[in-house]
Amino acid sequence: MNHNEQMQRYYERCDMDQIKGRLKELLAEAKQEISEINVDEVNLEKMVLIDVRESDEFASGIIPAKTVFTIPRGKLEFAVDDTLVELIDHTIVCYCLKGARGLMAAMILKKLGFRNVVNLKGGIEAWVQSGKSIKNYLGLFTLGK
């Protein structure tokens, strides 16, 4: 196989339209498997929240649940430890900025054996737009108020 043929095969494997199509299929599969809850259904005292955004996104604020983990989506599978496993019987709510990463995270946790995993529909963006508070290193606040 010459260099041009190798490059052609490489580009065929990296076809962005094909990759994006597969991502859409994967998200559709996750939507079939994972329940989504609305902002008003979140119980900050009883549910375990997992923020799967990137670490620089956490700084803007997280949802102030009694039990909340900040684990980036790309590290989630490797960050499941005894602490999280002890909470396996609780409702676990995954969230991100708008919902897609939270949905994928919830699907992964379900495949790892967590039984009651849901996604926060609309992510932290929906949370903030509903007028609910978030917290960061400066304290608890509500945007626009």
Image (spheres, grey):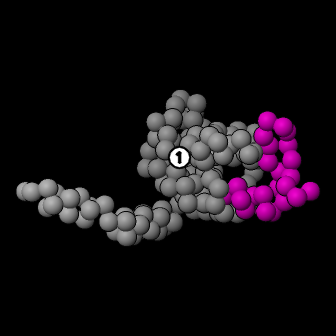
The magenta span reads: 123-145
Residue hosting label 1:
73
Q: Nearer the viewer, residue 71 or 117?
A: 71
Which corner quadrant holds the C terminus?
A: bottom right
Q: Is residue 127 above or below residue 54?
A: below
x and y percentages locating residue 112 in the rendered image = 44, 44
| Quarter of the image where one finds residue 88 | top right
Residue 124 on the magenta span: yes
Left or right: 111, with 96 as reference point:
left
Amino acid of disc 1: Arg
Q: Is residue 27 visible?
A: yes
Question: What count of labels does the image hold?
Answer: 1
| Quarter of the image where one finds residue 119 | bottom right
- Identified at 49% across, 44% down, the residue is 74
Q: Is residue 89 visible?
A: no
Q: Nearer the viewer, residue 41 or 57?
A: 57
x and y percentages locating residue 104 in the rendered image = 50, 55
Q: Is residue 80 above or below residue 107?
A: above
Which corner quadrant holds the N terminus?
A: bottom left
x and y percentages locating residue 31 in the rendered image = 51, 66
Left or right: 123, with 26 as reference point:
right
Element class at badge 1: helix
| Quarter of the image where one finds residue 139 | top right
